[in-house]
Image (cartoon, rainbow, N blue to C red):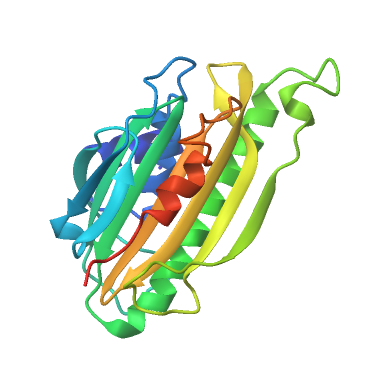
Amino acid sequence: MTRSASLTAWRAGRPRHLGKALASLLATLPLMACAPALNWRQMDLADADGLRMRWPCKPDRIERSLRLGGLGGLDAPLRMVMWSCEAAGAKWVLSAARLGSAVDVSPALRALSAATAGNLAWADKQARRQAPAPASPSTALSLIWQHTDTGEVQVPGMTPNPDARGWRTQGLKPEGSSGAVPLTVDAWHFSHGLMVFQAAIWRGERPLPLENGEDAVEVFRSSLHFPG
């Protein structure tokens, strides 16, 4: 099956590997040049174990059934819930899936990270392949693809896990049929009981506005917590 065909099948709701689902998210990211300013609001997500967090826009919620690669004992597809919205030229996303066994939590966190990194690496490669050669060092193609471990993730109330970590990926994504634009993704993986999470911000070259002088990425990340 071609990549485009697999994305079409995923959109139709058929179970697919998580990597292909994340590829679909990447493929649909508009990274709009003009988008509403940040309009923060706090939300409690009942079907995400009550996770409380701040959003800079009103998120939409979708569900998908898909298989999470890397879990050898997991035969049935997972129900993954995803919330996302667009503001200030960025995509703000939370994904959550409930597992059937505690032994699957660490492998699932690693699989989430690997799937995201793999899809971003594929996008960067495709962008460089289809874009024209750089005219100067200041062009987008002069950017180097980087995937950086940003350290342990500590979400108040989460279940401690050594595989709860954050990542920053910087590179390119395809734009149209013959271009490439910068893409930065900050992602944080963590768990609560049998539920695994990925919170992420996907953004382009334009810097995000400050929130009362504070970095918007940090406002989003630091708002994550489980009450109680």
Residue located 49% across and 16% down the image? 33
Rendered location of residue 178, percent (x, y) = 61, 16
Position of the C terminus, as image quadrant, is bottom left
Rendered location of residue 88, percent (x, y) = 44, 25
Residue located 50% across and 79% down the image? 162
Position of the N terminus, as image quadrant, is top left
Q: Is residue 103 above or below residue 122?
A: below
Image-based side of 124 in relation to 185, left or right: right
Q: Seen from this angle, which residue lies furthest left?
A: 46
Rendered location of residue 96, percent (x, y) = 28, 58
Badge count: 0
Residue 13, visible in the rendered structure: no
Rendered location of residue 224, percent (x, y) = 35, 57
Instruction: In this rendered view, identify the residue nearer to me: 72 or 150.
Output: 150
Residue 62, visible in the rendered structure: yes
Q: Seen from this angle, which residue lies furthest right?
A: 136
Q: Is residue 12 above or below residue 105?
A: above
Instruction: In this rendered view, identify the residue nearer to me: 53 or 137.
Output: 53
Instruction: In this rendered view, identify the residue nearer to me: 7 or 105.
Output: 105
Q: Is residue 138 above or below residue 157?
A: above
Instruction: In this rendered view, identify the residue nearer to me: 15 or 174.
Output: 174
Residue located 63% across and 61% down the image? 149
